Image (cartoon, grey):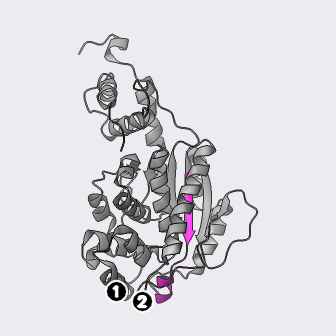
Amino acid sequence: MLDTTHSEAIWNRINNKTKPLGSLGKLEHVAHKLALIHSQNKSDPVTNVWINKPTVLVFAGDHGIAREGVSIAPQEVTQQMVENFLASGAAVNCFCRVNNVELRVIDTGILKPVVSQSKHLIQQRLGESTENFAYGPAMTHEQVDKGLEYGEKIVKQSIDSGSNLLMFGEMGIGNTSSASAILSALSKRSVEKCVGLGTGINAQQLTKKRQLVQRGVNRCRGQNAKEVLRQVGGFEITQMVGAFIAAAKYNTPVIVDGFIATSAAYVAAKIEPSCREYMIFAHQSHESGHKFMLQELAATPLFDLSLRLGEGTGAVLAVPLIQAAVEFYNNMASFEDAGVDM
């Protein structure tokens, strides 16, 4: 749990800036969260916060459920998009460039490993693909445990290299099926509410997708979060779960992206509730189940741009807002400094 000893002092600093109370809205809450995290284990509240080497970790993995035609894209697209990330050709690469964000791509288990010497590629494979969760568990117990360990490993490496702000993105054809199943199984909401169009499937595919997701949900509803993850999750979601838990362990804030990343945050918060306090939610995705997942996490996202791409794009787009919160907290004058009487 975050130590809130300095919470009141931090709010006093924010409230004494040259502005009406609360007039910077959500940015004030971001500044408070960052200052609170920076003040952990300190005898006095910090006077300044800082962002160093913001990094997005894009986890890629293939899903057995994809063989059922629940996406408009074939499974091979996962590998092709990993190659696109490494060639700096994807949307997330564009947003990283303009916002000076580091990017790493983690192969958690795509059908065929990418052959590359790129320093941006990290191999943490749990297999070639999960199993088809419509007919049985997506993963073994050993794969889940190893995936959680891998998630912690890459977070620690990122922090050790100097990053104090992380983002998690993903790539995996079929992963909206897993995220929807996780939401339905853990929240007890109906599959119909939780399953959306994903990459843009037609009505017939949507009906089939809901039927397949329902099979997985029927098998694991009422189980604990780790078992739900094993039954209907994905390799990339599992490693993100481990990464969210590790970020809290190492006192590092994480910007949460869209539907898939939030499903991992949801599982992580069920397993280790204290990690929720380190999450900053970037946006509300237009994948239909995301709003319900945000409700389950009592999360208020920073913006809504009608995004539904994944890759960590929404999280990276939030970086300028985080930096703005840091800047006003550090450098905006107080009423006393400015000689303003209120």
Residue 233, magenta (yes or no): no
The residue at the point 30 percent across, 22 percent down is 16
Disc 1 element: helix
Q: Quadrant of the C terminus?
A: top left
Report whether 190 appears left or right of 278: left
Magenta-colored span: 56-69
Disc 2 element: loop
Residue 238 or 333: which is nearer the viewer?
A: 238
Q: In whole angstroms, how far apart are the C-alphas of marks 1 and 2? A: 7 Å
Q: Circles 1 and 2: CB distance less than 8 Å?
A: yes
Q: Quadrant of the N terminus?
A: top left
Q: Which numbered dot is residue 273?
A: none
Q: Which residue is mark 1?
A: 215
The answer to which quarter of the image holds residue 34 is top left
What is the three-letter code of the residue carrying label 1? Arg
Residue 306 or 160: which is nearer the viewer?
A: 160
The residue at the point 41 percent across, 71 percent down is 229
Q: Earlier in the sequence, mark 1 or mark 2?
A: 2
What is the three-letter code of the residue carrying label 2? Tyr
Q: Residues within 10 Å of mark 1 (few under 14, many from 20)?
A: some
Q: Is residue 200 visible?
A: no
Total tally of numbered discs in the picture: 2
Q: Which residue is mark 2?
A: 135
The answer to which quarter of the image holds residue 340 is top left
The answer to which quarter of the image holds residue 86 is bottom right
Where residue 265 sits: x, y (%)? 40, 59
Where residue 8 sits: x, y (%)? 29, 28
Report whether 269 appears left or right of 255: left
